[in-house]
Image (cartoon, rainbow, N blue to C red):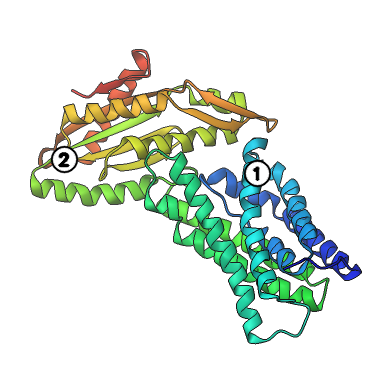
């Protein structure tokens, strides 16, 4: 498993992979900034396409240097505190070294004539990278989230599929570089198109039923689910409640720290709503700083308890973000005013409950903010 000596050809491949990675990051930086600003949680970037070939065909020290150079260039786009970014880099280096170990243990040299079994070794190296990286991310989420869901821990199908596809592209790049050291430059346009396409899919998905900044239901998606719930509640004769949340002085966040910081607060509010509402409650964002909840099988006293739990959760938030200059900040002491309306489903309509809850929100704001008000 010993590493070989560095040759002139290794330096050529190192230069080609590093240059291609830098060009890819520069061309796709705006797309990457948008994706990171509109999505919360762990973020998978396509720069692994340049990491995997380096690990399977360069000397180990050169492969690690290639990864670190990529991470240094990505840091301004990531807009994360340095300590978190350093920890994330260590988490990326571990699965990369696992793929290197698979290739070294198998004695594979991609520069030689490849047999079918050698291709399986490359795919095994990619699989080792995939599963170790997924396990590390899952462990961090499980330990840092108070109530992590299986989807949060394991990841969505879309994210896992993109990770797998990107690693397969990395294998193809390794095979191409083995026979033409300048081949990575031809892959850059393909990756830029892939980044742009993923952003469009995420945007279309957000435009159709979910809010792109918080991953909550948008107005259309919320009404679709609520309409179905109202039908069931009327059939059972059950009570329903609606809570409308309006963040207090939210414009101050955007004016003081910038819109990315405001987006971070919105995502933090979405997380609080996820953890403080109950299974079956329907949560949505109607735009701006307004959120709305439907609470099925809930009367007025029960709805007040849920709303107060939400209010306290938002008031206790400490949101890590960056200011207008990219410096890390912690945003705290944010509050919300909440209006709640409840009634038996057979005797009311959704529009009526929303009007009453809206009126209660205005009352909460006019009487001091950071409070829950029940509609008469």
For mark 1, does the 10 Å Cα neighbourhood hold few (<14), some (14 to 19), or many (20 or more) residues?
Answer: some
- Which tag is nearer the camera, tag 2 or tag 1? 1
**Residue 330 shown left or right of residue 306 in the figure:** right
Q: Secondary structure at mark 1?
A: helix
| Residue occupying the point 33% across, 29% down | 310
Residue 148: percent from left, percent from top = 39, 45
**Residue 231 shown left or right of residue 57 in the figure:** left
Q: Quadrant of the C terminus?
A: top left
Q: Quadrant of residue 238?
A: top left
The answer to whether residue 20 is above or below residue 355 is: below
For mark 2, does the 10 Å Cα neighbourhood hold few (<14), some (14 to 19), or many (20 or more) residues?
Answer: many
Residue 61: percent from left, percent from top = 79, 57
Q: Quadrant of residue 273?
A: top left
Residue 93: percent from left, percent from top = 66, 53
| Residue occupying the point 56% across, 31% down | 320
Q: Residue furthest right?
A: 8
The CA span between labels 2 and 1 is 43 Å
| Residue occupying the point 32% across, 24% down | 361
The answer to whether residue 368 is above or below residue 74 is: above
Which residue position holds label 2? 297
**Residue 298 shown left or right of residue 315 in the figure:** left
| Residue occupying the point 50% across, 61% down | 160
Q: Which mark is residue 78?
A: 1
């Amino acid at each position: 498993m010993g590493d070989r000596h560095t040759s002139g050809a290794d330096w050529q491949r190192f230069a080609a992979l590093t240059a291609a990675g830098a060009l890819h990051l520069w061309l796709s930086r705006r797309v990457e900034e948008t994706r990171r600003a509109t999505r919360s949680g762990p973020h998978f970037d396509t720069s692994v396409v340049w990491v995997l070939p380096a690990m399977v065909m360069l000397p180990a020290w050169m492969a690690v240097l290639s990864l670190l150079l990529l991470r240094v260039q990505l840091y301004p786009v990531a807009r994360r505190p340095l300590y978190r970014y350093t920890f994330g880099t260590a988490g990326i280096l571990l699965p990369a070294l696992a793929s290197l170990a698979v290739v070294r243990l198998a004695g594979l040299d991609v520069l030689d004539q490849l047999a079918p079994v050698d291709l399986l070794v490359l795919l095994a190296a990619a699989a080792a990278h995939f599963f170790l990286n997924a396990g590390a991310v899952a462990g961090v989420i499980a330990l840092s989230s108070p109530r992590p869901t299986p989807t949060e821990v394991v990841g969505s199908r879309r994210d896992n599929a993109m990770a797998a596809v990107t690693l397969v592209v990395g294998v193809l790049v390794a095979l191409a570089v083995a026979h033409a050291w300048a081949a990575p430059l031809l892959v850059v346009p393909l990756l830029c198109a892939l980044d742009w396409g993923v952003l469009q899919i995420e945007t279309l998905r957000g435009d159709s039923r979910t809010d792109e900044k918080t991953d909550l239901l948008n107005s259309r998606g919320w009404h679709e689910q609520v309409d179905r719930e109202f039908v069931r509640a009327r059939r059972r004769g059950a009570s329903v409640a609606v809570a409308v949340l309006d963040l207090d002085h939210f414009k101050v966040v955007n004016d003081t720290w910038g819109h990315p910081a405001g987006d971070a607060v919105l995502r933090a509010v979405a997380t609080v709503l996820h953890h403080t509402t109950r299974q079956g409650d329907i949560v949505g964002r109607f735009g701006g700083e307004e959120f709305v909840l439907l609470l099925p099988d809930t009367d007025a006293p029960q709805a007040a308890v849920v709303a107060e739990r939400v209010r306290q959760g938002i008031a206790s938030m400490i949101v890590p973000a960056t200011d207008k200059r990219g410096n890390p900040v912690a945003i705290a002491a944010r509050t919300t005013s909440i209006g709640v309306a409840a009634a038996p489903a057979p005797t009311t309509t959704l529009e009526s409950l929303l009007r009453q809850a809206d009126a209660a929100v205005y009352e909460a704001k006019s009487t001091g903010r950071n409070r829950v008000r029940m509609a008469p």
